[in-house]
Amino acid sequence: HLLTMPPARLALQQDLGSARSCSGVLALCTQDEIAQMDAVNLATAVHRLAKLSNGVHERSLVTAHPRFVELYDALSVQLPNLNGQGLVNLMWAIVQLDHIPEWMPQLLSLCSERHREFSARDLSATLSCMAKTRGFKKFAELEPLKTEVFEALSGRIDELDTPTDLVCAVAAFSRLALRDEQVFGRIAERTIGMLDSFVTS
């Protein structure tokens, strides 16, 4: 998507990626700029705020900021224009900020529709997000998505490339009470193989 971005959108994307503080991100998000942002800019801004915010106090300041409210409002319209990875990154940001938007059901539905586009790591990250917050449980869209993502990831365990990826997947399965002996057996085999490679390298 970056290769096809208009120059102004690409320049903003680079500025957002270079920002080193929440205040720096918010300074880039003027009302006029937010009005011009595409879906990737908007999701990146929220993701950077989630990544850079430190502690409950700073997160509460960020989510109460007028520019943040405008970012969420703009995303309600732009959500369908995000690709699979963009949807997952946005879900992660929402969990990190502990600030669930009104359009969360739409985001969950889009993840359900497009989960086949997700990488194995994205599938694992989606389950981890669902496992880390109780706030999603009230949404009817959660259970179908959980089942679909688990089934999709179950067939792609070999695509999880690092021990950390495997640990995150197992932790999410456990928290979500997802049980499948064959899947856990495959993860165990994959983990042992990785450890053997690490020891002999």
Image (cartoon, rainbow, N blue to C red):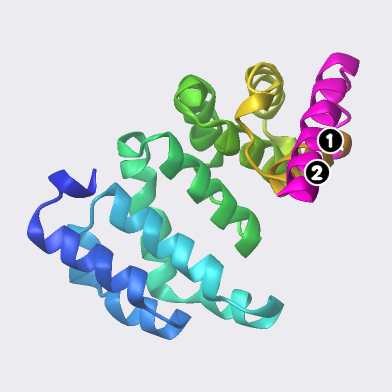
Marks 2/1: CA distance? 5 Å
Quarter of the image for residue 190 reads: top right
- Residue annotated with mark 1: 192
Q: Nearer the viewer, residue 172 or 22?
A: 172
Point out which mark residue 195 bears: 2
Considering depth in this image, is 190 or 20 the residue closer to the camera?
Answer: 190
Q: Residue 22, which numbered label?
A: none
Q: x, y percentage for residue 172?
A: 79, 39
Magenta stretch: give its range: 175-201
Q: Kindly state the secondary structure of the residue where label 2 is placed.
A: helix
Q: Amino acid at mark 1?
A: Ile
Where 155 sits versus 93, above or below?
above
Q: Is residue 175 left or right of residue 139?
A: right
Q: Crowding near pointer 2: few (<14 within 10 Å), some, many (20+)?
A: some
Q: Nearer the viewer, residue 104 or 149?
A: 149
- Note whether residue 132 is visible: no
On the question of residue 17 being in view, the answer is: yes
Q: Are marks 2 and 1 in contact (CB under 8 Å)?
A: yes
Q: Position of residue 30 (x, y in %)?
A: 25, 75
Taken as a whole, is the magenta stretch helix, strand or loop?
helix
